[in-house]
Image (tube, rainbow, N blue to C red):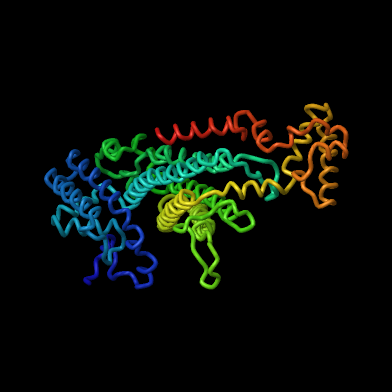
Amino acid sequence: MKKRKAVWGGRFKGGPTASLRAIGDSLHIDKRLAPFDIQASIAHARMLGKQRIIPKKDSAAIVRELTRMKAQIESGKLVVEGDDEDVHSWIERTLTERIGDAGKRVHTARSRNDQVATAFKLFVGDAATTLMWRVSDLTSALVMQADSTVDVIVPAYTHLQRGQPVLLAHHLLAHAESFGDDYGWFTTATVYFEDCPLGSGAATGVPYRIDRRAVARELEFQMGPTENSMYSVANRDFAAEFLFHLAMTAVHLSRLAEDVCLWSSSEFGLLELGDSVSTGSSIMPQKRNPDGAELTRGKTGRVIGHLVGLLTTLKGLPMTYNRDLQEDKEAVFDAYDTVVMCLRVMTDTIAQSRFRPEAAERLLRKGHLLATELADFLVTEKRVAFRDAHEIVGKLVRTLDEAGKDLSDVDEKWLAKFDPRFKGCARWLDFRRAVDRRDHVGGTATRQVKKQLAAWKHRLST
């Protein structure tokens, strides 16, 4: 293939070494910016023509051909490939090969510095929309499972120890709340991308009578053009912010994945993974492994690493543009692809698996889950101070442990013999009543959880 001359090559007698090209060329990474870079170039070229900075006929030819190139790239008829330094060089070269010297005018009144910042912002805004819908799909799967298990009671865990009874639906909706936070950010994410860098030039602006507001309007940057040209080309806060929220979504996915791994283990037995969302063992024929959840949990570290990597890159950079910033796109692209993939696999895992009510019943019978209820009984009906009630029930639990019994193994009569103040506690030894006593906003009472479910269904349908 014929070697391409770099867009900056006029200053130099020879081309870069193979090692410099290897570290510097980024077409294989930033080619996915092509539709966004072309979109920005169309707006820029149209403005150049209207401002008579370039001939109108050249502006029209550039806009027409770039529009065709964008459609061909999106349909797969035109492939972004070659030995060009980056996607911006590839677009300019391809455009010039197609329409001649008029294509060389597309770079008037801009630099690759403001060009890449604009295309990257457009990409991140588009990616946030995709993530919004993927998060919504997973949240819907969680809500559907919660709706189908609204009567199932399981232990709530603190410190990974059984604590108190809770509705399984309440547990599932806790995960939904986390992803609801993610959905909210991705829905409003455009606030971080609403000012347009294009027209800032390399760092100080450009010596042409450009109309930056017109370009910003066409590209739908609601806040118009950026106010400081140096900030415009140096700023990657939007990329770091996006990576932070990708990392938070990955953390939420990992916590859900951990619960899936626990629930589907033989020890818990609470979740039966669907055949299509689990794998087997190469040696143990009985195994059903939660590989999707485990891989999601594992890939979270990768996403967090990209955030830390970008922040580390940014922390020592002087104003304005430095080539170090080329590291931003690979980090964002990989983190984005990873989170989208994990959202899909966890959506499938939740939607295509089944919870076992009989396992929930078994889990309730160990761990003295109604101990707090007995303490609350003493406070409510016997007027015992809570700290004293806590000590009384603590001694009861110690006695039961020494006897090899669980609180679920004894009744009111046995308890009253242990301490007469337990007389009348029978109705406090019921898991359903224990759950339904938490009848307040945010509590696990059946009435409250059904209200939460109704609210989530409405939210997801609008």
Q: Which image quarter holds the N terminus?
A: bottom left
Q: Is residue 33 above or below residue 85?
A: above
> Foreground residue, 367 or 256?
367
> Foreground residue, 131 or 440?
440
Q: Is residue 59 above or below residue 97?
A: above
Q: Position of residue 266 (x, y in %)?
A: 61, 58
Classify residue 196 as left or right of residue 161.
left
In which image quadrant can residue 461 be found? top left
Classify residue 131 as left or right of residue 173.
left
Q: Residue at x 74, y 37 (%)?
A: 429
Classify residue 189 as left or right of residue 400.
left
Classify residue 218 as left or right of residue 143.
left
Q: Which image quarter holds the C terminus?
A: top left
> Foreground residue, 91 or 252?
252
In which image quadrant can residue 198 be found? top left
Q: Residue at x 35, y 34 (%)?
A: 222
Mark yes or no: residue 119 visible.
yes
Q: Position of residue 425 (x, y in %)?
A: 78, 33
Mark yes or no: residue 312 visible.
no
